[in-house]
């Protein structure tokens, strides 16, 4: 332990990492450099410098990663229509590799001996952080306090903070954890660990309760170019501003709430609550434009890759070669996905009500049932059906 002189800690100012700063100093006798990633937490970042210094950090880095996060992590996942186990749009999973990447950059910059994080030994985040560390700095030394120290619960950490006058937001009365970025907020732990327990109404921060949403629906149009959203309601916006506007619109109508018992990579089932208003809106808009721009077999092939892609991201393999290769293929097929989707937002629902594309594959003169034009010969269908039925008829003889 004595050879560790300087550690860069992924710091949020929350319960776990507040304790970890003091613990690292006491346990290893080392300097602790705290690093916080600005991924859209807003006012949560303001008190971090004072809190980090008060608990013993020699320095705090705050890196504005919002643009990179949306452009290089959120948008690629949306191009892949990535969704884990049918519900989760991967908000935390996408943030962790970026945080870890910047953490390694800072470790090199300050000459640190090690890096550390506040992820527990039961969760996914330890894997996501550490797979990224190893991918970018193979000889890195990692300190994972939850796998080393004597504390066994967040209850004990809260008591530790009270005893050492460490300011925290978690309390014994409200002991669930939150993780926020531009794409979502996740809630887990504490009172939420009972999968039969309905989350309290006042817990949610990004969206109104659907029952309290406006009584009139709102229509929203999203423009896409080569698979990426570029405008909302005709206004072109950069990646961050666009996601913020999507969050505002989705949150106003109570869109994007998910209550999920998911399968963690380590083999544990876990209950998580997610708010992803803007991501949900953009996910459905993207699928709508794809419907009229992608070839059938290309679309079906992409859909077959979604579980694999989402699993790679969820499990922490963002920098793995297979994810990068798969991303390249998915990005290539997104080139024709240019057009506009129209959505109807109402009381928690996000419904596709229109889609159009300047070079779409949809042909109304072929699809119509009203006029049987020469563009499609119905008699051709008979041979098509007979050939496809051949193996079925042979199987009955």
Image (cartoon, grey):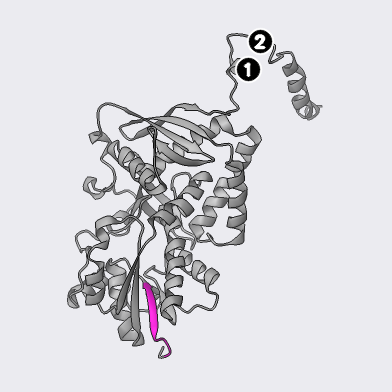
Q: Is residue 355 left or right of residue 50?
A: right
Say which residue appears at 26% left-offset and 72% top-offset: 157
User: Which residue position is annotated with label 1?
Assistant: 366
Lateral position of residue 321 relative to residue 31, left or right: right
Q: Residue at x 59, y 56 (%)?
A: 324
> Secondary structure under badge 1?
helix
Q: Residue furthest bottom?
A: 2
Determine the CA span between mark 1 and mark 2. Answer: 8 Å
Residue 249 in the image: x percent, y percent?
32, 38
Q: Residues within 10 Å of mark 2 (few under 14, many from 20)?
A: few
Q: Are marks 1 and 2 in contact (CB under 8 Å)?
A: yes
Which of the numbered marks, if any, corresponds to residue 373? 2
Q: Nearer the viewer, residue 134 or 42?
A: 42
In the image, residue 163 sits, relative to residue 192, either above or below, namely below
Residue 147 percent across, percent down from the top left: 41, 75
Nearer to the camera, 295 or 266: 295
Which range is magenta?
Answer: 3-9
- The residue shown at (44%, 56%) is 68
Dot 2: element: loop
What is the quadrant of residue 226 in the picture?
A: top right
Q: Position of residue 55 (x, y in %)?
A: 24, 77
Q: Nearer the viewer, residue 194 or 104?
A: 104
Quadrant housing residue 102: bottom left
Q: Residues within 10 Å of mark 1 (few under 14, many from 20)?
A: some
Q: Is residue 8 magenta?
A: yes
């Amino acid at each position: 332990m004595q050879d560790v002189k300087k550690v860069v800690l992924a710091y949020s100012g929350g319960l776990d990492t507040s304790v970890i700063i003091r613990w690292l100093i006491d346990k290893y006798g080392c300097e602790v450099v705290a690093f916080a990633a600005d991924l859209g937490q807003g006012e949560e970042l303001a008190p971090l410098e004072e809190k980090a210094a008060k608990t013993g950090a020699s320095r705090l880095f705050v890196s504005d990663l919002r643009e990179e996060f949306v452009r290089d992590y959120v948008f690629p996942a949306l191009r892949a229509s990535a969704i884990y186990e049918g519900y989760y749009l991967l908000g935390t999973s996408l943030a962790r590799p970026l945080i870890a990447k910047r953490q390694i950059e800072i470790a090199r910059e300050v000459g640190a001996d090690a890096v550390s994080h506040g992820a527990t030994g039961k969760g996914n985040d330890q894997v996501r952080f550490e797979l990224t560390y190893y991918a970018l700095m193979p000889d890195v030394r990692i300190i994972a306090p939850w796998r080393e120290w004597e504390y066994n619960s967040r209850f004990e950490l809260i008591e530790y903070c009270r005893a050492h006058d460490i300011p925290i937001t978690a309390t014994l009365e409200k002991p669930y954890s939150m993780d926020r970025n531009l794409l979502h907020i996740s809630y887990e732990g504490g009172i939420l660990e009972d999968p039969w327990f309905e989350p309290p109404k006042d817990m949610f921060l990004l969206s109104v309760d659907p029952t309290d949403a406006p009584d009139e629906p709102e229509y929203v149009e999203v423009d896409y170019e080569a698979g990426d959203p570029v405008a909302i309601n005709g206004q072109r916006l950069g990646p961050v501003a666009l996601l913020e506007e999507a969050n505002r619109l989705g949150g106003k109508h109570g869109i994007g709430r998910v209550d999920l018992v998911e399968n963690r990579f380590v083999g544990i089932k876990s209950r998580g609550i997610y708010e992803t208003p803007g991501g949900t809106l953009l996910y459905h808009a993207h699928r709508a434009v794809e419907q009229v721009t992608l070839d059938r077999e290309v679309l079906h092939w992409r859909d077959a890759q979604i579980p694999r892609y989402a699993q790679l991201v969820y499990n922490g393999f963002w920098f793995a070669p297979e994810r990068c290769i798969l991303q390249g293929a998915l990005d290539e097929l997104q080139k024709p996905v240019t057009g506009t989707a129209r959505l109807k937002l109402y009381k928690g629902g996000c419904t596709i009500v229109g889609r159009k594309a300047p070079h779409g594959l949809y042909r109304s003169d072929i699809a119509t049932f009203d006029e049987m034009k020469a563009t499609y010969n119905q008699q051709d269908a008979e041979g098509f059906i007979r050939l496809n039925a051949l193996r079925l008829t042979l199987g009955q003889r």
